[in-house]
Image (cartoon, rainbow, N blue to C red):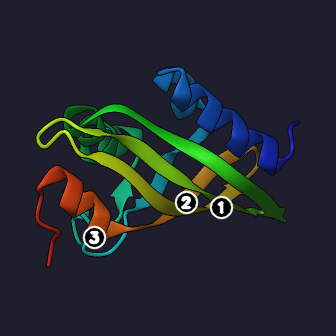
Amino acid sequence: MADNVSIVRSGYEAFAKGDIPTVLGLWDPKIEWNEPEHGTYWTGAPLHGGQEVINGVFAHLAKDFDGFRIEIRRIVGSGDTVLVEGRARGTAKATGKPLDAQVAHVWEVRDGKAIRVQEYADTWQFAQVTGNTPKN
C-alpha cells in the first residue's frame, strides 16, 4: 500500500488533471472536509462525503475561477497526518483578477483513505478577487 504522503500527492495530481473520480477514490466515503472559517465557501460546519465537497467547494471553484489550481510547495507526513503547503492560483471569472493565495491543507489518512481535511487559506484574498463576501 502507498504511504500517506503518496496518497495525498496523487490526489492533487488527479485534481490538476480534472480527474475527480480518482480524487474521490482516495477519500473515505464519509470524509470530513473543513473549509477556512469565514471563507467564501465556508458553511459554518464541516462537509461530509465526496458529494458535499464537490457541491460545496469544487463546483464553486469551477464556477468562480478560470485555471484554478493548487501549486504544492511542500508536503510533510507524520503518521496519519499529512501537511500540504502551497498556493491557490487562478483568475476570478467575475472580476478578471488573479488569485495567488497561500493555502495549507492538513489531511488525516487512515487505512489508505483520506478521512479528514482542514483547509487554511488567505480568505481575504479569495474575497477580494472574486467579489464574494466572506461568511460571518
Number of numbered tags placed on the structure image: 3
Above or below, 118 against 91 in this view is below
C-alpha gap between disc 3 and disc 1: 26 Å
- The C terminus: image quadrant: bottom left
The quarter of the picture where residue 65 lies is: top left
The residue drawn where x is 59% and y is 26% is: 14
- The N terminus: image quadrant: top right
C-alpha gap between disc 2 and disc 1: 5 Å
Instruction: Using the image, tell me which numbered label, if any, was put on residue 116.
Output: 2
3 and 1 marks in contact (CB < 8 Å) = no
Q: Position of residue 118 (x, y in %)?
A: 50, 66
The residue drawn where x is 36% and y is 45% is: 53
Residue placed most toward the observer, 65 or 19: 65
Query: Where does label 3 land, which residue?
Result: 124
- Between discs 2 and 3, the one toward the N terminus: 2
| Other residues around mark 3 within 10 Å, as few (<14) / some (14–19) / many (≥20) | some
Name the amino acid, label 3: Trp
The residue drawn where x is 23% and y is 72% is: 44
The quarter of the picture where residue 12 lies is: top right
Name the amino acid, label 2: Arg
| Other residues around mark 1 within 10 Å, as few (<14) / some (14–19) / many (≥20) | many
Residue 52 lies left or right of residue 79; in this view the side is: left
- Between discs 3 and 1, the one toward the N terminus: 1
Query: Where does label 1 land, which residue?
Result: 108
